[in-house]
Image (cartoon, helix red, strand yellow):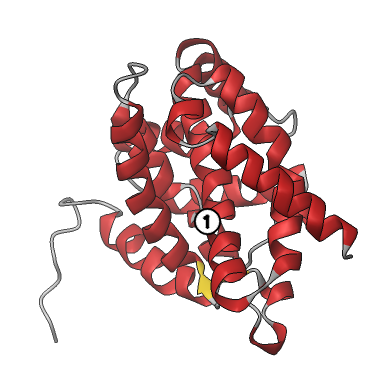
Amino acid sequence: MNQSFPTEVLPGVMDVWVSGQIGLPLVIRWKKFLQNGKAREQNSLQHSYSIAVFAIIFVKMLEKYASFDKEIIMDAVLLHDHGEGELKRDILYNDKEESHDFDEYLAFVTRFGQLPEAVFKKCQRAFLLQFALSNPVSFPEKARAIMQEIAEKQKVEALIFRALEYCDYFLYALEQYQELDNVGLMVLVLGNHIPHFEQLAKELPGFKEVFWTEEVSRWCYEVFSRGEENT
């Protein structure tokens, strides 16, 4: 029999460490759009990696326009979809409801709650960054208090996370548009997120310079308009 590892060392870490590796690859994103080879299959582990790489780049580009806490942003990017892996599901943006977010939060807490309290609290705060600006009423009171504090004291960080998430949707749709001529997905994503990009351009310092430039904005509106006419 193998000798047992001391349980008091790294409590809960092995379970958390393994769970994402096993669960996230099983969650296929964008399922509705995978028919007939019109989109590249992407699982949640691939997404978590790609958005983390994008976040490294995006955050460095925003640094000269605002000051913010990079640690919570990067923690949030890496942890934000862990609940999907626990529940073995991904809900498309257009189909997602508050109850889905709540279920993913509970799954996250169940797994990460095994960690030492101080570590868990930092992970919990990072996970809640994604919901801070909406502060869903169904979440527990303590979680809502954390989100309220984030919205008041770290609004830039919450806006950056929101920008990262919406831009990541855009990048995936752009890849399918350019590589596989999937106009429908591009039009759907633009229809969902052009208003968000316009709002971020008003609220997030540097967003207009880094992403939502006049050229990008014009291109998006033109592609969306042409796609709408042909659907």
- Residue 55 pos. (x, y %): 37, 44
Residue shown at 54%/34% (left/top)? 212
Residue type, numbered disc 1: Leu
Provide the secondary structure element on which disc 1 rests: helix
Relative to the observer, which residue lies in front, 142 or 102?
A: 102
Which residue was labeled with disc 1?
Answer: 171
Count up the numbered dots. 1
Q: Quadrant of residue 193?
A: top right
Q: Split into 4 quadrants, where in the image is the C terminus? A: bottom right
Image height check: is 6 above or below 73?
Answer: below
Residue 93 in view: no
Image check: 38 left or right of 58? right
Image height check: is 224 above or below 173?
Answer: above
- Residue 71 pos. (x, y %): 29, 32
Q: Quadrant of residue 5?
A: bottom left
- Residue 209 pos. (x, y %): 45, 28
Alpha-carbon neighbours of circle 1 within 10 Å: few (<14), some, or many (≥20)? some
